Image (tube, rainbow, N blue to C red):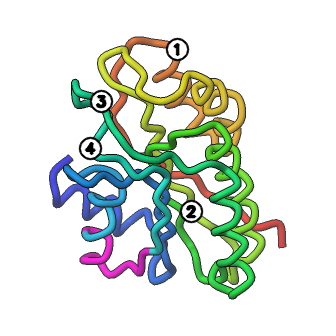
Amino acid sequence: MSSSSTEKVLNNDLKSPQRVLSIQSHVVSGYVGNKAAVFPLQLLGFDVDVINSVHFSNHTGHPGGIEGDVLGGDQLKSIVDGLERNGLLRDIGNVLTGYIGSESFLRAIINLLKTVRSNNTDSTVRYVCDPVLGDNGEFYVPPELVSIYREEVSRLGQAYQRILRTKLQTKLTVKCVLFINFSSPR
């Protein structure tokens, strides 16, 4: 995707001026996950809050492997509890997720979306999900994440469900950004 088409997608599909909560990987060497997403979003005028799902030496595609830490669901819940207690979830209008390194963390994201929606001062929270699973027929996430995306996360929106099903059940390469609206039940 060219930078002008990326800018068009972000300007048209992310809700502004509300904040973006970006939950993705962090790598020391390279530009993926939050390291690649935050600065462009800030240049487009978004206020971005960051939660790192992992802290790795490099991205998982390197042949020598990775070193680092994977956050669990309890750690995410603790962070969200602190944000909620301090009223910092009220203005989040967009949640962006990328690489997730553990089953408990992915399940905690499902709960986080409900929490953000219930704290939001607006009627919707946009969920932008890039289910980073792997490349070239190889998964670089724990295998149990695939079924969670397929059976739980895919229920969060029709468009996401169709594309994820295609990605998981075929050998097609699907390169896209997925947008899902969450309407508040107010």
Mark 1 against mark 3, which lies toward the viewer?
3
Task: Using the rendered view, name the quadrant where residue 79 is placed.
Answer: bottom right
Mark 1 surroundings within 10 Å by alpha-carbon count, few (fewer than 14), some (14 through 19), many (20 or more): few
Mark 2 against mark 3, which lies toward the viewer?
3
Label 1 to label 2: alpha-carbon separation: 26 Å
Residue drawn 22% across the image and 55% down it: 5
Tag 1 secondary structure: helix
Mark 2 surroundings within 10 Å by alpha-carbon count, few (fewer than 14), some (14 through 19), many (20 or more): many
Q: First in sequence: mark 1 or mark 3?
A: 3
* Range shown magenta: 40-48
Residue linked to disc 1? 169
Is residue 8 or residue 22 the one in the foreground?
Answer: 22
The amino acid at mark 3 is Gly
Q: First in sequence: mark 1 or mark 4?
A: 4
Label 1 to label 3: alpha-carbon separation: 27 Å
Q: Are marks 1 and 4 in contact (CB under 8 Å)?
A: no
Residue linked to disc 4? 58
